[in-house]
Amino acid sequence: MILKMKLFFPVLIVVMVHHGLSGQDLSQLKSTDPIRLTGTIGTQNTFFTSSNNLGYRSPFSNNLFMNLNMAIYGFEIPLSFYYANNNSSFSHPFVHFGMSPRYKSLQLHLGYRSMNFSSYTYSGLNFLGAGLEYNWKFIRIGVFAGTLNQAISDDPTIMSPRMPLYKRNAFGAKVGFGNYSNYLDFIVFRAKDDTTSVLPAWRNQLTGLENVVVGVSTRITVGRYLVLSSDVAGSVFTHDMGSYAVEIQGLDPILDYYTPRFSSTLRYAGDVKANLRLGSFNLLASYRYIQPDYYSLGTTFFNHNIQSYGINLNMLFLKNRLVAAASFHMQEDNVTKRQLYTNKGMVYTTNLTARLSQNFNLTATYNGFNQNQTDGRAVISDSIRIDRMMHNVTLVPSYNVIRGNTVHGYSGNLNYSMNKNQNQLVQDPGDINTLAAGLGYNLGMNDRRINLMANWSLQNSSSDFHDFKSHIFGIGATKKFLEEGNLNLNLNSNVSLSNVNDSMKGTSFMFSATAGYSYNKKHSANFRIGFNTIDNHDREGLYSVSGNDLTIGVGYTYTFMPIPGRSAAASPMP
């Protein structure tokens, strides 16, 4: 069932393409440039010195980088190189390669590729092999065969060998009917570890896995208003291929493809969604159910032994000047009622964005979270029961005034959050109340290409064990020079004052200046100098950190610009 990869290697080496390529449309080959080179090459270098003797940064940092993409008749060959303080890496198509050529309704996947069948069967994992997708009118076909994991089998006698890993072969197929709006897909996925792919010394420490998943995915669109969709799947998962086989009468044809064992489990998962649109009103309702120990080797890890409900609501009012959104999601585990306790979590949010006038906007957001425990097979003691509530409220107003070439921008933000354990029998250090506020002013003078900024922020976080306060005052300015504005200067400075429990105080000052210059869209250079001074100490004189930091950085980047060719000439004028 697994295709032999040797049949595809000659093809892959000839075309020399990388795993990051998108599908190449062979029907457009005639209008493609023969050779096309794009990308960047450059360097970034930093000098750092400090008087506080903490030694948390290297005095010198030197980086060289290259990211090039060569296209030969539409087939792309990316090359990358990176050097940083004597550490370098180089990647090229002969290490990781793949391509997805497309011709009309047919698309091939060769080399390192990925496909997507459904959430619970096979979704997005890279394979080394071959695949095919065919979508024509009402026919939907997808199939692949290859290797999900390459074997890792270092000599166990060497120092610090890597953790062993079996080679994992996989096969997947999807056959369906319909189009994007209405379809019905039947999916099968199989993966199996090759237990002979590692040295015998590792095999007693490593269990082989085997998995077969069968799924159904569907979507139904009712007019322009209602969309119903569903994904369901069943998974037979063997946790140890070395365990004894189980004889099941009446399943002889199935046993030719899969051998049930004492470590095998049969589990189910699925979800259903309904999306209703009525003018400016949109409602999405969803339900998800995943049995305990549901696994698929074709997906990344997701929570199991859960069921969840969700509702999302979006509405537009007053000719789209008022946008309102609300959502509620609840999730609980212990779906089979076999756990000692049941854990529940609820998340609810509301958001309101209002354009009150041409210049004034206001955004208000509330987020809430509740976590609690209830009885399962056992009765939980009140002294350890989890019952936590979190609230978060945010207000963000903004006001802009435009007078000729001058723009005045005023902004503010206010945020309050509360994290509280509602179990009165527990004194929890995680009970924290936080208040954050800020004001900002921005002055833009477009005719002079100058932008000035000033801001202030406050944060106050308190609990039964600590009280933290901080104030930050900042100013900044940007200026563009030269006729085309390709020389930029950016200045920033701020002062920070902090206090912990009225016993530990901190003061810091930061200044930075950054200049950037670009020429002919190909050359860009930057220079940055930053200075920072800190002074942290406690009232008793037992702790003190003070000193000055200086950072200087310089960099250069060259960009390869594509030379106009046939593809540019063939493109219609805008």
Image (cartoon, helix red, strand yellow):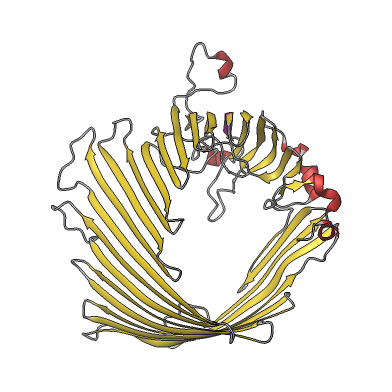
Is 79 situated left or right of 335 in this image? right
Q: Is residue 187 magenta?
A: yes
The answer to which quarter of the image holds residue 253 is top right
Tell me where residue 379 appears, x and y as whole percent.
18, 36
Question: Which SS does the magenta portion mostly show?
Answer: strand
Is 198 situated left or right of 545 in this image? right
The residue lying at 51 percent from left, 11 percent from top is 250
Q: Does residue 310 appear anywhere in the picture?
A: yes
Q: Does residue 492 appear anywhere in the picture?
A: no
Q: Is residue 212 above or below residue 421?
A: above
Is 84 situated left or right of 476 in this image? right
The residue lying at 31 percent from left, 45 percent from top is 345
In the image, 367 versus 316, the foreground residue is 316
Tell me where residue 396 appears, x and y as whole percent.
37, 67
In the image, 547 versus 457, the foreground residue is 457
The residue lying at 38 percent from left, 42 percent from top is 310
